[in-house]
Amino acid sequence: MRIISWNVAGLKACIKKGCLDFIKKEDADVYCFQEIKSENIPFIEGYHSFASFAKKKGYSGVLVYSKIKPISVTKGIGEENFDSEGRVLTLEFEKFFLINVYFPHSKRELSRLNFKLRFDKVFAEFCKYLEEKKPVVIAGDFNVAHREIDLANPKQNMRNAGFTPEERFWFDGFLKQGYIDAFREFVTEPGNYTWWTYRFNARKRNIGWRVDYFVVSESLKNKVNSSKILKDVMGSDHCPISLDL
């Protein structure tokens, strides 16, 4: 099974930049899109589609296209505060749960840091609840660079959104509960990023952050064949990532 995850930063805009051609070319089994913003979901032949939208128009939202019909689909993590923002969609397959997630951004001046940390806690509890039944595969934009090698300028960003000690501490603890960062099973070098600001020619200069991840239950570790960053795919300020199981 091949899964691709991508923060499209607006589905309509990404489609104009070639997203549908990318879907056809890659021919993955499942696509997990975050920050779709729109409720207009195009039909794609051969795929079932599922989405969770934010109550606020033009904001957030997650979408899954899957060739395989899931056993069940769950929207949200059971707390209205978070679920009204359309951040989590869970598909149950025969051997595992697939969670498509768009974590909150802690914002400038960290105005949403507490909101994000509460989301983090409830999300971790939700994952543990699912794991009582079967393993999980988490695809999404975590809106945090986990370690110093996960962004180009760690020293300058120590107290900035997405690289605060609190967010990174949560990620440490989450992985210790029995999960692996799939990409780091294959690549341990710095310089591998999934998001670049549109300013300062950052993408061309590779001044970026790795904030998009596949995190999987440790019990699936020997099922992970590859985990890649598709850095040359344009269409968003993020690039897609892939997981082969």
Image: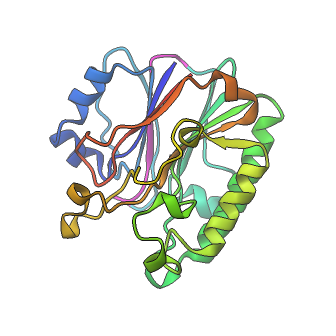
In the displayed structure, 227 sits above or below 82; it is above
From where the camera sits, is residue 245 visible? yes
Residue 204 in picture, x, y percent from top left: 20, 55
Quadrant of the image occupied by residue 90: top right
Task: Assess whether residue 29 is covered by the magenta stretch.
Answer: no
In the displayed structure, 97 sits above or below 143; it is above
From where the camera sits, is residue 144 visible? no
Is 102 on the left-hand or right-hand side of 202?
right
In the displayed structure, 146 sits above or below 187; it is below
Q: Quadrant of the C terminus?
A: top right
Is 129 on the left-hand or right-hand side of 144?
right
Is 226 on the left-hand or right-hand side of 93?
left
Residue nearer the viewer, 68 or 58: 68
Residue nearer the viewer, 59 or 21: 21
Residue 200 in picture, x, y percent from top left: 20, 70
The residue under the point 35% across, 60% down is 208
Residue nearer the viewer, 186 or 1: 186
Q: Residue furthest right?
A: 132
Q: Residue furthest bottom?
A: 109
Quadrant of the image occupied by residue 60: bottom left
The residue under the point 32% across, 62% down is 207
Q: Residue furthest left?
A: 16
The residue under the point 35% across, 53% down is 37
Residue 159 in picture, x, y percent from top left: 53, 81
Q: Main secondary structure of the magenta part?
A: loop
In the displayed structure, 119 sits above or below 75; it is below
- Range shown magenta: 57-69
Is 177 on the left-hand or right-hand side of 167?
right
